[in-house]
Amino acid sequence: MHNKITLSQLLNIKHPVIMAPMFLVSNVEMLVEASKAGITGCVPALNYRTIDAFEAALKELKDSCTGPFGVNLIVNKSNFLYKEQLKSCCAFKVDYIITSLGSPKETINQAHKAGVKVFCDVVNLDYAKKVEALGADALIAVNKEAGGHFGPTSYEKLIPELVENCNIPVISAGGVGNNTQMQRMMNLGAAGVSVGSIFIASTESGVSQEYKEACVNYGAKDIVASNKLSGSYCTVINTPYVKNMGTQQNGIEKFLNKNKRLKKWFKAFTFYKGMKKFEKAAFSATYKTVWCAGPSIEYVNAVKPVNEIVKTLVNAKG
């Protein structure tokens, strides 16, 4: 079985850790620091408004990263820039692409021609088998503890199930904030881990000081799931504003979301509106704050440089 390959071997990195792609948070500086610290970072292509801005970032990453880096692509119809983003990833020969939301078939075909690896977000065995059959190089097993959009299954169940039934490496996403938790995933058979939330409060992250401080001051018990922002459930910090706004779609929103003819447009509109809210909150101090984070902010006790955060993950003492 090939799934005995670790992420370190797959990407030739010192520690089997991906700094997870985070909408509006991940940036070039964080990925460069991640590579210096012996892990790999991944950035969402959607963090760049235009293809020119995206390619400028890829060029900078190619020039500055001392190790491999990846790009997260949304591969369904809500991402109007998908085809161009994929083309850029192949032209710049990024080390790997992580696909989310949709069939990765075309991405895998194009990327493999360019020598680029493809890891696919999966939340269950059925989908994992599908992407493995399409030629995916690894699975990103998104579990219940993940920040942002999360899966329905606990890591205790999901990792062993995928490891047992699939022949490609399984990278666990969600529920890792320190070395003990990372070792727990590896002991269940994971080839590596994808870790996001604990890096929001990094010195290099470009989000507002308020967002970083919220990750320091709030903990796991303050994380709630809301479906008001992207139409799908997404974890956010339960600030007074979120408490006031509520986390469930109202009757009209639910109706529009279920109506066959209107659903696609409403979903796209909800997503756009929700992303705008995230963007405003991420970069400015406003009482209308919707901050995305996962339960592992429990382990964030100060704003630190990326390399310090990596140490807490990869050293047993951390």
Image (cartoon, rainbow, N blue to C red):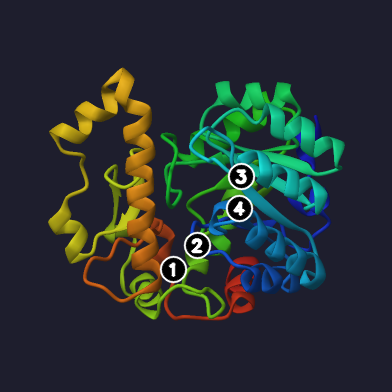
Question: Residue 45, labelled with which disc?
Answer: 4
Q: Secondary structure at mark 2?
A: loop
Question: Residue 73, labelled with which disc?
Answer: 3
Q: Amino acid at mark 2?
A: Gly
Whole-Å distance between the Cαs marked 1 and 3? 28 Å
Q: Which residue, given by chain and number where applicable, does mark 2 sit on?
A: 177
Q: Which quadrant of the rendered structure holds the C terminus?
A: bottom right
Q: Secondary structure at mark 3?
A: strand
Taking depth in this image into account, of 15 and 259 the one nearest to the observer is 259
Q: Amino acid at mark 1?
A: Tyr
Q: Amino acid at mark 3?
A: Leu
Q: Earlier in the sequence, mark 2 or mark 4?
A: 4
Residue 248 vs 176, above or below: the answer is above
Q: Percent position (x, y) of residue 182?
A: 58, 56
Residue mark closest to the camera, 1 vs 4:
4
Q: Which residue, given by chain and number where applicable, does mark 1 sit on?
A: 299
Please report the residue visible at 54 percent of the width from the left and 57 percent of the height from the top: 49
